[in-house]
Image (cartoon, rainbow, N blue to C red):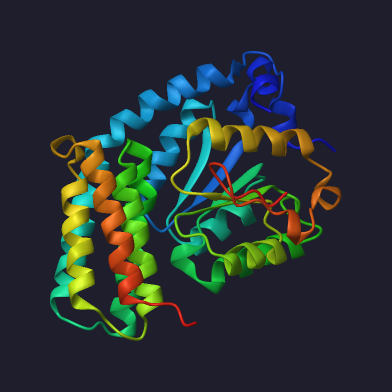
Amino acid sequence: MAGGLSRALNAPGGMTLAQACELAAVNVAFVREKAIVAMDDALLDLARLCAVGPPTLEHRRELHALSCTIAGVGGMFELEALSKAAHCFCSLLDETEPNWDGDAVAVHLAAMRILLAPEQTPAAAQESLLEGLAKVRRRSAPRPD
Amino acid sequence: MSSLKAELTFNFSNASVVMIDASPIFIEVLTGILSGCGFRKMFRCTDLRSGADAVKTHSVDLVLIDPYGFGEAAYNFVSWMRSERRGPNAAVPVIMLTAYTYVRLITTARQCGADYVISKPFSTQGLLERILYVAESEGRRGELIAPPEVVSSTGSGVEMF
């Protein structure tokens, strides 16, 4: 039996992929401001948790969840560099666990703060920032030979 | 796939979708995307309990879930859906959306019965193309599962099959 999705294909009153993308973009734009506030709040929470020092297991999970939110939402609003920095922070948390590199964490938080307002940072500088974060992460969590 | 999909029309106004994501802001973003694509019946769930309630009490056509915030329980949720063989929603397409994709997630997603894993962030076109692919493939779930060695991790998302 055909499901609801397959019945939707070529059904009367439909739209094309291009039309859907256009309408979705308009809808997503309405959420932009709220999303920026949510990511700003997430960054503040990250900073608050990191200020305490080496996290408990529960705090580490919270840090991971907050940075995942930023990684997932940022790229939906053309904040790809922020998204990548947040993803890098998630990797840093994983790769250094159970240890804690406060300096590397601070660098990531500062970078994310800068990349939340990317219009103030040229594209090349953003790229350099991301490369720098990757280096910091690799240095903090060297892979065993 | 894009050129073929460009000609296709679709009307999702009668299809229902369950969104499960611990992030309220992402649920809002997803709602904007899906309503732009014509979905009108949307269950917005920030926890698994409300997601399970929606699946238990409604006939749904698509489930989008970010397992991240729920740990193992998210995979158990999909397994439970699939195990309800006599239920109306046992074969519903499940697409996992995740900002942090790692190999174990893909393996676990495959094992629990999810159809796709898509990396966040994604484009509307990327998500919609996969929904359309799932729509065209309904009823052929078992035939479409690719062996692990062909799972792609390139593109806008990670395709399971």
Q: Residue at x 38, y 77 (%)?
A: A142
Figure quadrant of residue B28: top left
Q: Residue at x 34, y 84 (%)?
A: A57
Q: Residue at x 47, y 41 (%)?
A: B122
Residue nearest the observer in this picture, B113 or B120: B120
Residue nearest the observer in this picture, B140 or B11: B140
Residue nearest the observer in this picture, A97 or A47: A97
In the image, farthest residue toward the front? A145
State left or right for residue A122 relative to residue A23.
Answer: left
Does any portion of residue A4 appear in the rendered image?
no
Count of numbered circles on the image:
0
Does any portion of residue B82 appear in the rendered image?
yes
State left or right for residue A98 relative to residue B124.
Answer: left
Residue nearest the observer in this picture, B34 or A120: A120
Image quarter where the N terminus of chain A lies is: top right
Residue A26 on image: x %, y %: 36, 23
Residue B72 vs B47, above or below: the answer is: below
Residue B76 vs A9, above or below: the answer is: below
State left or right for residue B52 relative to residue A68.
Answer: right
Residue B32 on image: x %, y %: 41, 33
State left or right for residue A57 relative to residue B48.
Answer: left
Q: Residue at x 42, y 56 (%)?
A: B46
Residue B62 on image: x %, y %: 63, 44
Residue B119 on image: x %, y %: 51, 50
